[in-house]
Amino acid sequence: MSPTNILGLVALVVGSLLLFLAWRASNAPVDQISEALTGRYTENTMWYLVGGLIGIVIGVALLLRGRKSD
């Protein structure tokens, strides 16, 4: 396994973990109330969502790039 594939896999796992944490945080009572009153989630939940999506996109891109160079 090339270093690019390993890095892609790590980024994919971290991104997935961040999305899982965002999902859990969005179900918290404080976040539910905040979303009901303001129409958006708390700042921490949004950072988890954004970080998770970026991690998954970078992870997939690195995995595909590593596959091309093999």
Image: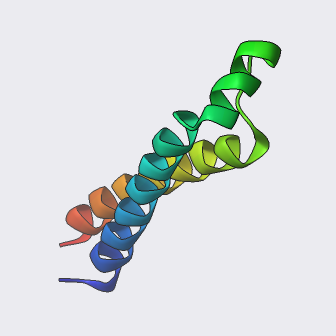
Q: Nearer the viewer, residue 19 or 61?
A: 19
- Residue 66 drawn at (x, y percent): 28, 68
* Extreme residue toward the front, this view: 29
Image quadrant occupied by the C terminus: bottom left
Q: Is residue 7 left or right of residue 58?
A: left
* Residue 8 appearing in the image: yes
In this view of the protein, can residue 57 be seen by the observer? no
Question: Residue 55 or 64: which is nearer the viewer?
Answer: 55
Here the colouring is rainbow
Q: Residue at x 58, y 43 (%)?
A: 49
**Residue placed most toward the observer, 36 or 46:** 36
Total count of labels: 0
User: Residue placed at 25% from the left, 70% from the top?
Assistant: 69
Residue 67 in the image: above or below residue 53: below
Q: Find residue 10 and report its horizontal and vertical position in percent.
A: 37, 72
Residue 29: image quadrant is: top right
* Residue 63 coordinates in the image, percent (x, y): 29, 62
Where does the image place residue 47, in percent across and percent down from the top left?
A: 68, 49
Query: Please, is residue 25 above or below residue 69 in the view?
Result: above
- 28 vs 48: above or below: above
Q: Quadrant of the N terminus?
A: bottom left
- The residue lying at 30 percent from left, 78 percent from top is 6
Q: Is residue 33 above or below residue 9?
A: above
Left or right: 46 in relation to 28: right
What residue lies at 21% left-to-right and 64% top-to-bottom? Answer: 67
